[in-house]
Image: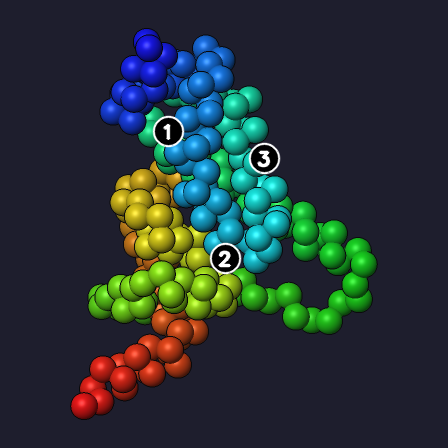
Amino acid sequence: MADLARVLTWPEDEAQLVMELQGGSEAAFDWLVTHYHGPVYGVVAGILSDSSEAADVTQEVFLKAFCGIRGFRQGSSLRTWLYRIAVREALNHRRWFWRHLRLHRSMDGDDDDSNALSGFAYDGLSPFDELAGHEVQQIVREGLRQVAEVFRVAVILRDLEGLSYEEVAEVLNISVGTVKSRILRGRRELRRALEPVLAARRAAEIQP
């Protein structure tokens, strides 16, 4: 009964959860995986394009978390720490994949999908706000693949995972100002990719 009581208090008492994890508690680690598996997979899947690869990398994220929990700093956020591992592992996997692919393919000159975009200002709703609803999540994720990686990660963390600007900055180890700039630019690129869907939705709304 005492073990159950501890499990039930972990969402409110993160410090106690971290202590249990650092002490090697299997129950604590099971709770961590159960509670954070979906969000971590969402971040990884947003960076990678293959669901099976995303599942493998997600497992690697929790393995790294299990091995590295003793180095977790009290006072930090466990969620942002996990997301930081998730982003790093997903990007490392993506880089490894492209390096491996280049060894088996001739150069086609099509590797410039991460070019920097020009600056801009946009203050309206995010594309996620305009395309709210489970039925369009796949469309949004397809659109995200057309967004440069450096901006896509920030958009996923902010608009899909709901992190604050400060939390995104902590995950990516950049300033809040840089986070806001990347999100704005990522939203613009995503909006451009989703414009046909957005236009159809607006047209349907004004029809009698």
- Lower position in the chain sequence, tag 1 or tag 2: 1
* Disc 3 target residue: 60
The amino acid sitting under disc 2 is Glu
Q: Residue at x 38, y 67 (%)?
A: 136
Q: Secondary structure at mark 1?
A: helix
Q: In the rendered image of this protein, does residue 12 appear above or below residue 177? A: above
Q: Residues within 10 Å of mark 1 (few under 14, many from 20)?
A: some
Which quadrant holds the C terminus? bottom left
Q: Are marks 2 and 3 in contact (CB under 8 Å)?
A: no
Q: In the rendered image of this protein, does residue 206 appear above or below residue 22? A: below
Q: CA distance from mark 2 to mark 3?
A: 21 Å
Q: Residues within 10 Å of mark 3 (few under 14, many from 20)?
A: some
Tag of residue 78: 1
Residue 71 visible, this angle: no
Q: Nearer the viewer, residue 125 or 123?
A: 125
Q: Position of residue 41 (x, y in %)?
A: 48, 45
